[in-house]
Amino acid sequence: MPEPEEPNLLTAVDVDAPGYPGEAYGISDEEARELRWPFGPIMRFLWPWGAVGFSTVIVSFILLYPSIAPLLGEVLPDSEWAFEDSGIRKIQDNGNFGEGTRVCIVDTGIDIYHPEFERINLVGFRDFYADNSNETRDIGYESHGTLMAGLLVANESFIGAAPGVSLSVAIALGPTGKSSNERMVSQAIRWCRISQNSDIISLSLGSEPGSGVSSSSETIEAVNEALNEGIFVVAAAGNSDPESNNSDVSTPASIEGVISVGAHGKDGNPWKDSATGSEMDPFTGEERVFPNQKPEILAPGVLLWSCISSEYEPPYAYSSGTSDSTVLVTGALALILNEYGGVIAGENGRIDSHEMSLVKVALAKSARDAPNQISSHDSKIGYGLLDAEEWANQVALEFGVEEQ
């Protein structure tokens, strides 16, 4: 044992010290030892019988989970707050569910056998990962594509953001939800543009700045082609790694014309891992200006209840991230295009860069302030929190739509 004069010594206890003999207490030496170590009897009970009991409980839970899982689904909190908080439900209350808007999701696919998807309008499916477009499926280990599709078009136990859209799905991410082949993503984006004639391309994906995606990359070229054709691109700001030196939103969310989406929780505060935007555009080297500062908007993206593989019981799970919030903004925009798409396109029926910019101006003006937001644009919060109903109102104002 250390000497009492040791300056770093606060307490020293030798549990094996003999102590007083049992006769000092009128008991046996063994009983006296247990008095000095009261947890001894407890430890003898816990091992091995406590360990056996604990293991039995765990095994029983695993075996009985299929029976109790449906009951858990009834009592676990849902994520209706996200659709209410974002203003999506207010637009839906007017009977607008996005019918007529064409949305293309680039992800890991979709489990078409999920009960939430029985009534969806799936108009296109293409597999750029394994070149097996005859089998509509989700190749993701965590059902990432199905999770995203559920937030958009679920229409059974819960209602997604825009269940009436004409949906196309492209597989361009691998089973882990990441893409090791940029060419697949660019091909998928071009398929959305050319073959599917999409109004919106939803990209719950991205790569960190400095990861090899240059200003001349195929993905960036494909996104700019879509923007030039009047197709809105909504992309995840990215889930930042605290240990990385990432100082901007992910690419392609970093592209000027793209709507970059971060995530916030139920309290309105930004999700801790939602990426922070840079003041400088990495492609031009110039300062970003309104309405293209990054990110543009925060939307609900923490613990959202959605769909996973239909092989699970129940086939639902919670998900968090800027991927989730991206889909809610996609859904809100689909509702707005359903109502004002013709007005936005104008007489020539084609949405140009100025008209797309006005939609982004309306988004920025409609955003609600987040808690503690002190500037019109914050590098983590963007212009504020998504308010789909007010976004629609601002679109009407920007395009001179008279109130009915």
Image (spheres, helix red, strand yellow):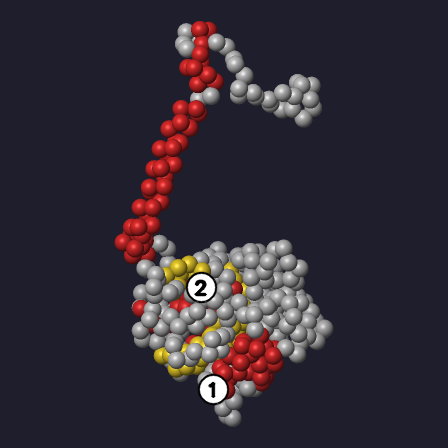
Query: Where 279 falls versus 67 (above or below)?
Result: below
- Give the percent coordinates (x, y) of residue 237: 57, 67
Q: Is residue 51 left or right of residue 183?
A: left
Return the x and y of residue 161 as percentages of the image width and height.
41, 70
Nearer-N-terminus badge (1/2): 2
Q: What residue is shown at x 46% (from left), y 6% (from top)?
A: 24
- Circle 1 is placed at which residue position? 195
Can residue 349 be seen in the rendering of this structure? yes
Q: Residue furthest right?
A: 285
Residue at 65 percent across and 70 percent down: it is: 212
* Residue 387 picture location, percent across and down: 48, 68
Label pair 1/2, CB-CB below 8 angstroms: no
Q: Residue at x 56, y 65 (%)?
A: 238
Q: Which residue is mark 2?
A: 141
Q: Quadrant of residue 168?
A: bottom left
96 displayed left or right of 10: left
Q: Is residue 312 left or right of residue 300?
A: left
Q: Amino acid at mark 2?
A: Tyr
